[in-house]
Image (cartoon, rainbow, N blue to C red):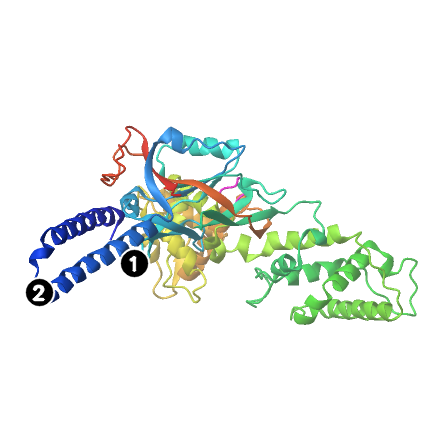
């Protein structure tokens, strides 16, 4: 029972009770039967009880935010010096479903894995009846408005459609965090306050040291899956490349009967090795050496471990932060150069943030619309019936959706149908006279080979897509912070169209819809 019906019912019950009481007082002397008196009084009591329950139900319905109306200019008029805003896009087709029949008591948002969209849950207050929660898809990112740049961005949006939460006080970001570094903004409105759980990036910087990152972040960087060019080991990690570089650059460790004016442990690279293996001592205990590590490097590793053990036992191990910046640089470089996050097709679905603060999948989607060669390459890359593993499925699914939304559709059937049935190979030198882009694609993926299998060609297409966008990628770690809750001033249901959801007729508090750019407005009730 919504607010309109609840209010109407109260008036009906008040009228019915008044008429019933009046009638009883007027005609009670004519009721000579005692049972008749009891029957009438019972009916009066039931009407009164029903009225009381209806009043309690209607009062309960006032909790939360109720819809009012404001013009667009007023709705987005945020004083960024004292207030903040959170804009949650919702498709205009879903706006009528939010409606104005019930107050809103709770709003929560949760981003999808790819960060391309969010799920918005809105809880409606239905009084004494169990509340209902409806879910909507937010196709675009949530915009946190706390400065002039983001406020101007909100004002420039021509097709506003969704929720705009305005706070009574300014949302405080963690020190040093910029709005453009925020990757996710999980929003929860409850009990009149809004809580924000943000995810933001810490971009790699040359001045970073080991202490710039916490243990969890360093562990993530080191254990991130890495591309292996020399082995098919699927467990190859960034740590393996870091270890290899440090051992290779550490000077040879000579035996006791050999003389050296500068012992290895007094050189810069020797001290870097000692510091690395000391700092990550616990990590090394849980992670094995790369199985294909050369024997001389295995021996060097063991000698370094023996030196550290001996130095600790004799209280001669020097603890220094001097080379922490060098070690951090080695870890970051290995992560950027070899990690799946940045260098492998299967991780494109994770939607890495680019140097220009745009997401990589949005960039891929934009370029697919404009670049025929890239569209052909993607069309080839998403063919999955030749895959041995399923690790590329998530990326394939996303790119298939992008291809469905392109203005022009291209096929690579000519390439697929050109497989030699005897050898199972494709001639990479063939010329498609009617499709020069197809010829150019084969040349690009040939790697100077004359032929290859269809499976290999697809793998090359996927690698080429990653290479195409590698220049936009940059290294970072993602951090999380729960911001201090702030009181909600109002919540606006924005609709860029002039047609509005009709406000409820209310005999107690009639309201008129404003014209042109009018927005539905949610206001907390006292």
Q: Residue at horizontal 49%, vertical 42%? A: 358
Which of the two residues, 8 or 158, is positioned nearer the viewer here? 8
Instruction: Tell me the distance, in whole angstroms, between the alpha carbons under discs 1 and 2.
Output: 40 Å
Q: Residue at horizontal 82%, vertical 54%? A: 268
Foreground label between 1 and 2 = 2
Number of the label disc, if any, that sits on residue 215: none
Residue 355 is inside the magenta segment:
yes
- Quick check: 341 left or right of 499? right
Within the image, what quadrant is residue 300 found in? bottom right
Q: Is residue 225 above or below residue 122?
A: below
Which of the two residues, 457 or 196, is positioned nearer the viewer here? 196
Residue ID for mark 1: 129
Residue 399 is inside the magenta segment:
no
Q: Residue at horizontal 57%, vertical 48%? A: 201
Which secondary structure class fits the magenta region best?
loop
Label 1 sits on a secondary structure element that is loop
Residue ID for mark 2: 33
- The segment highlighted magenta reads 354-358
Label 2 sits on a secondary structure element that is loop
Residue 216, horizontal then vertical, whole percent: 63, 60
Which of the marked residues, 1 or 2, is nearer the chain's N terminus? 2
């Amino acid at each position: 029972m919504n607010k309109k019906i609840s209010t109407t019912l109260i008036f009906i019950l008040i009228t019915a009770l008044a008429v019933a009481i009046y009638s009883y007082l007027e005609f009670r002397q004519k009721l000579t039967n005692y049972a008749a008196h009891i029957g009438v009084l019972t009916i009066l009591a039931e009407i009164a009880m029903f009225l009381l329950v209806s009043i309690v139900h209607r009062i309960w319905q006032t909790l939360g935010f109720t819809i009012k109306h404001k013009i667009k200019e007023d709705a987005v008029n945020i004083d960024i010096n004292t207030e903040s805003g959170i804009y949650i896009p919702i498709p205009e087709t879903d706006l009528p479903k939010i409606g104005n029949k019930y107050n809103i008591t709770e709003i929560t948002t949760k981003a999808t894995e790819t960060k391309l969209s969010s799920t918005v849950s809105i809880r409606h207050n239905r009084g004494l009846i169990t509340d209902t929660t409806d879910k909507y898809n937010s196709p675009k990112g949530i915009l946190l408005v706390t400065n002039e740049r983001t406020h101007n961005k909100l004002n420039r949006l021509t097709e506003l459609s969704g929720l705009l939460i305005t706070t009574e006080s300014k949302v405080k970001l963690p020190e040093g965090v910029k709005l453009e570094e925020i990757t996710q903004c999980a929003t929860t409105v409850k009990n009149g306050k809004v809580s924000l759980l943000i995810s933001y990036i810490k971009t790699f910087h040359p001045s970073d040291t080991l202490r710039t990152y916490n243990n969890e972040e360093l562990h993530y960087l080191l254990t991130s899956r890495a591309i292996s060019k020399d082995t098919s080991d699927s467990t190859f990690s960034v740590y393996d490349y870091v270890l290899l570089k440090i051992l290779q650059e550490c000077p040879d460790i000579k035996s006791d009967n050999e003389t050296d004016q500068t012992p290895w442990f007094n050189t810069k690279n020797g001290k870097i090795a000692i510091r690395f293996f000391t700092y990550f001592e616990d990590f090394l205990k849980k992670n094995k050496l790369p199985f294909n590590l050369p024997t001389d490097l295995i021996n060097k590793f063991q000698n370094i471990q023996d030196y550290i053990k001996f130095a600790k036992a004799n209280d001669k191990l020097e603890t220094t932060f001097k080379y922490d910046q060098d070690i951090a640089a080695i870890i970051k470089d290995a992560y950027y150069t070899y990690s799946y996050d940045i260098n492998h097709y299967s991780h494109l679905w994770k939607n890495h943030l680019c140097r220009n603060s745009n997401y990589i999948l949005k960039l891929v989607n934009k370029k697919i619309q404009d670049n025929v060669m890239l569209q052909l390459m993607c069309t080839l890359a998403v063919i999955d019936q030749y895959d041995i593993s399923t690790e590329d499925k998530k990326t394939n699914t996303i790119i298939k959706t992008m291809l469905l939304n392109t203005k022009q559709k291209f096929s690579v059937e000519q390439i697929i149908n050109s497989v030699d049935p005897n050898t199972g190979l494709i001639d990479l030198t063939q010329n498609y006279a009617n499709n020069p882009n197809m010829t150019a694609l084969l040349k690009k993926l040939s790697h100077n080979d004359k032929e290859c299998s269809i499976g290999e060609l697809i793998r090359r297409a996927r690698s080429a897509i990653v290479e195409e966008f590698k220049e936009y990628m940059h290294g970072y770690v993602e951090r999380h912070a729960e911001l201090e809750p702030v009181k909600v001033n109002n919540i606006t249901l924005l609709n860029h169209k002039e047609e509005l959801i009709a406000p409820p007729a209310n005999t107690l508090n009639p309201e008129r819809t404003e014209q042109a750019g009018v927005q539905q407005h949610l206001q907390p009730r006292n």
